[in-house]
Image (cartoon, rainbow, N blue to C red):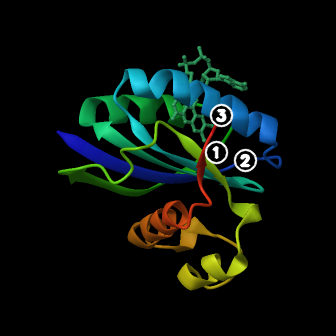
Amino acid sequence: MLVRLLYASRTQEPITAEEAGDIVRDSREYNPAHGITGMLCYSDRMFMQLLEGGRRQVNSLYARILADPRHHDVILLDYEEITERRFADWTMGRVDLDKQNPSLLLKYSATARLDPYSMSGKVVLELLEELIHSAVAVPSP
Ligand code: FAD
């Protein structure tokens, strides 16, 4: 059975490209081996991640991520059983939200500053899909 999980979290300090790169590297080692695809986005002090895969595998990875001291205030935005993946082409990509056109964020939220804590999970999912379709989200090297 396949599930899709979407969460957001915060960091104490601004996320550096190097830190984000470390996490993407971890993900690209672990996730494909466990049949997990998805997308990691970050902005100044915030992560958003979407994971798709088998229920057991996704739940188990989420438990590891929850325990990670590099972030806090993890909020589960959406969790659902799915019949097919929407992000099947990805092992794990990243999007730097601070480099996006503000009008894209304004389309989905009250201000051009992304705040997933005040958005519905479904709306955040739509935003992520648009990021992919507008080709601003690139798989990490
Ligand atoms: P170990 O590598 O044995 O590490 C032990 C503990 O230290 C763990 O709690 C670990 O989280 C923490 N830790 C590891 N590296 C650092 C570091 N550089 N600084 C501080 N603490 C550290 N991993 C994936 O495999 N796939 C993902 O999709 C994924 N997404 C993530 C998204 C976010 C926003 C974050 C913050 C982390 C993500 N990780 C992901 C990393 C994941 O949380 C674990 O660090 C990783 O899976 C290794 O877990 P481990 O149990 O083997 O811990």
Answer whether residue 100 is visible to the viewer in this image: yes
* Circle 3: residue type: Pro
Q: Say which element carries label 2.
A: loop
* Circle 2: residue type: Thr
The residue identified by callout 1 is 72
**CA distance for labels 2 and 3:** 23 Å
Question: Mark 2 and mark 1 in contact (Cβ < 8 Å)?
Answer: yes
Answer whether residue 112 is visible to the viewer in this image: no
Of labels 2 and 3, the one closer to you: 3
Compared with 67, 11 (above or below) is below
**CA distance for labels 1 and 2:** 6 Å
Where residue 46 appears, as percent x and y from the top left, is 68, 54
Q: Residues within 10 Å of mark 3 (few under 14, many from 20)?
A: few
* Circle 1: residue type: His
The residue identified by callout 3 is 141
Quadrant of residue 77 within the rendered picture:
bottom left
Q: Look at 36% across and 45% down and name the residue there.
A: 88
Q: Say which element carries label 1.
A: strand
Compared with 46, 120 (above or below) is below
Q: Residues within 10 Å of mark 2 (few under 14, many from 20)?
A: some
Q: Give left or right: position of 87 versus 26.
A: left
* Ligand 1 in which quarter: top right
**CA distance for labels 1 and 3:** 26 Å
The residue identified by callout 2 is 11
Q: Earlier in the sequence, mark 1 or mark 3?
A: 1
Q: Say which element carries label 3.
A: loop
Where residue 47 appears, as percent x and y from the top left, is 63, 51
